Amino acid sequence: MKDPKANSDASNSSDKWWLSFYQDTPFITYLDTTHGEDHEDILNFLYNHCLLDRGKKQSISIFDQCCGIASIGLPLAKEGFKVYGADICPQFIQEAERRAEMLKLKDNLSLQLTDATVYLPPEKVDLTLNLYTSFGYADHQTNLKMLEKAHQSLKSEGIFLLDFPNFHLVLSHFRKYIVREIGPSDAPITVIREAQLSPLEGRLKQTWTFIDNDGKRTRQESSLAIYLPDRLLAMLKEVGFSKFTVFGDFKTAAAYQTDSPRLIIQARA
């Protein structure tokens, strides 16, 4: 399921902080918890608003640009769509492959350990996804490259769906600390997220502390670009996208407002 060449792309990215972040923290448990909260809403949104026709699933291909543990790719592959997934984190790809093998989905799901700023699937696809704030962690030019690859991955008039924080809401209701518990009740993991705005850099910097049931602490830092809707739309236009529809959440598919939970942009190649 892996392309050996893809490993070289990932290894060339060793200077990127997220390689250590995702491998040195219990992030699979975190993803299972947080992704599970809106999993069905996202799938319903894709069927209702992204032209996923179950009657034509054999002819529809999908690229999950930063697939993580394939939370969305696995059910789409199980439904019968051809899904390509890429992620730079070996831990995520290994777990996604384990789950795909358990569900016997190897024929419909192709996973690559690679950098999404350089990778393209082996064929043009109908739908490319970038979900769960998987975009915006690099410098501006590298972020643009990821959007450019998304555009290049699509057939003419193909759909790109970008899911990003609504920074109008984040900034107006800024929360320095967020604490939550994840994992099973008999072995919970406490996650403490401390956020700091860096306005001169245009970044949201976060320190994540994971405390397991035995008191062991794992601490990592992350940095996310602060992009407001107009800036993201300009970036998407710059790499060739057009015909934009902007939503505010997956559950209701309501039009974007400044107080919407998310910023979800649908664009055409």
Image: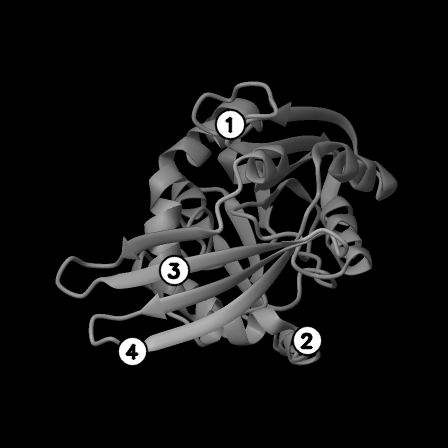
Percent from the top left, x then y, of residue 92?
Answer: 46, 66
Question: Is 43 placed left or right of 259 in the picture?
Answer: left
State which quadrant residue 114 falls in. Answer: bottom right
- Inter-mark Cα distance, 4 to 2: 28 Å
- Inter-mark Cα distance, 4 to 3: 13 Å
- Inter-mark Cα distance, 3 to 2: 27 Å
Q: Which mark is residue 192?
A: 3
Vertical arrangement, residue 64 with respect to residue 38, above or below: below
Question: Is 245 placed left or right of 76 in the picture?
Answer: right
Of the image marks 4 and 2, the number of the one nearer the N terminus: 2
Percent from the top left, x then y, of residue 49?
Answer: 55, 24
Q: Amino acid at mark 1?
A: Asp
Quadrant containing the C terminus is top right
Considering depth in this image, is 57 or 159 the residue closer to the camera? 159
Q: Secondary structure at mark 4?
A: loop
Query: Which residue is most to the left?
Result: 186
- Which residue is label 4 attached to? 216
Q: How is the rendered protein coloured?
A: one colour
- Which residue is label 2 attached to? 13
Q: Are marks 4 and 3 in contact (CB under 8 Å)?
A: no
